[in-house]
Amino acid sequence: MKAFIAYPGSKYRVFWDLIGGILILYDLILIPMKVFEMPETTFLITMDWITLIFWTGNVGATLTSGFVKQGVTIMSPSRILFNYLKTWCIVDCVVLGPDWAFTILASGSGTESVKMLRMLRLARTVRLLRLFKLKWILDSINDYLDSEFMSIITNIVKMVLFLLAINHFIACMWFLITSDSGDGLNWIKKYGYEDVDWSMQYLTAFHWSITQFTPAGMEVNPTNGTERIFTLCVVVFALVGFSYVVGSITGSLTQLRGLSEQATK
C-alpha cells in the first residue's frame, strides 16, 4: 500500500496543489461576482464541473499523499487517513455534498428554475471555505522554490493579489448592499448604472473600491445611510490593510535590493 503513497514534496503533488490553488482563485473571483446576475455561459458551466470533479478527486489524492508533522514525513496510510479525518474531511463533506446535490438537481431541472439556481449559487458559496486551504497550498509551493530571489518575487506577487482580492470582495459587497436597498435612492440609480451591462457595474464598483485605499477619487459616492456606514468601515479597514500590504511589499523590495548589492560586490 505504501508504494502508492506520494511524497508531499514530489513534483506530482506540487503540480496538483498548483491546479488546486488556481481553482480556488477562480472560485474566489467568480462566486462573489454572482451578485451582478451574470448570465450562465458554457464556459462557466464547464468550469463548475471541472472544479467539482477536481475537488472530488482531491480526496483520493490527499489520502495517497504523505504529510509532514514536526519535521517528519509521514507515509503511513493509516496515519494519513487519521490526519485527513482530523483536518480537511469536514470541509470536504460540507462543500462537496451540497455542491454535487444541487448541481445534479439544477442540471436535471433546467436553467429556467430560478429558485434552483439561487440554491445552487448559495451552495457554491460554501466553496469559499477552501480559502483556508489556499495558504497551505501556497506554503507548499513556496517550499519547493530553492531560490531566494524567486521566493521574494512570489511574496510580492502574493501581496499584490491579496490586495486585489480584498478590493474584489469590497466591490461585490458595495454592489450587494446597494441592490438590496429596495426602492430608495442608491448610487446605481443616482449615477445611471441601472440599465448598463453587469461588467460595467462591476468595473465601476471595483474602481470605487480601489479609490478607498488610495488618494484617488471618482464620480460615485454614497447616497444613503447604509452606503455611508459601509464606506466608513471600508476606509478604516483600508488604513490598516493597505499599510500592511505596502509594508510587506517594501520589505520584499528591500531584500531584492540587498541581493542585487551582494551580487554586485
Image (cartoon, helix red, strand yellow):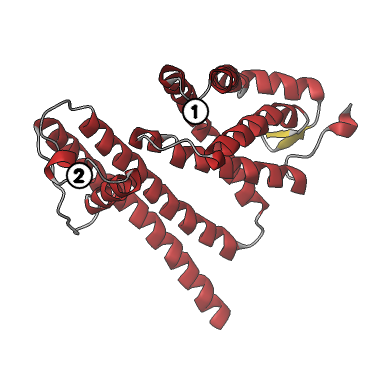
Which x, y percent locates residue 253? 43, 66
At 53% from the left edge and 39% from the top edge, which residue is drawn? 44
Vertical comparison of 230 with 259: above or below: above
257 left or right, relative to 168: right
Image quarter hosting the N terminus? top right
What residue is shown with label 1? 129
At 41% from the left edge and 17% from the top edge, which residue is drawn? 115
Instruction: Tell me which amino acid carries mark 2.
Output: Val
Give the secondary structure at mark 2: helix
- Which of the labelled discs sits on residue 235, or is there none? 2
Which x, y percent locates residue 170? 30, 40
From the viewer's side, name the closer residue of 87 and 166.
166
Pointer 2 or 1: first along the chain? 1
Q: How far apart are marks 2 and 1 (CA)?
A: 26 Å
Image quarter hosting the C terminus? bottom right
Q: Are dots 2 and 1 in contact, CB under 8 Å?
A: no
Which x, y percent locates residue 178? 21, 33
- Residue 66, image quadrant: top right
| Furthest-bottom residue in this view | 265
- Residue 29, image quadrant: top left
Q: Can residue 96 be seen in this view?
A: yes
65 left or right, relative to 203: right
At 9% from the left edge and 32% from the top edge, which residue is drawn? 225
Which x, y percent locates residue 7? 78, 39
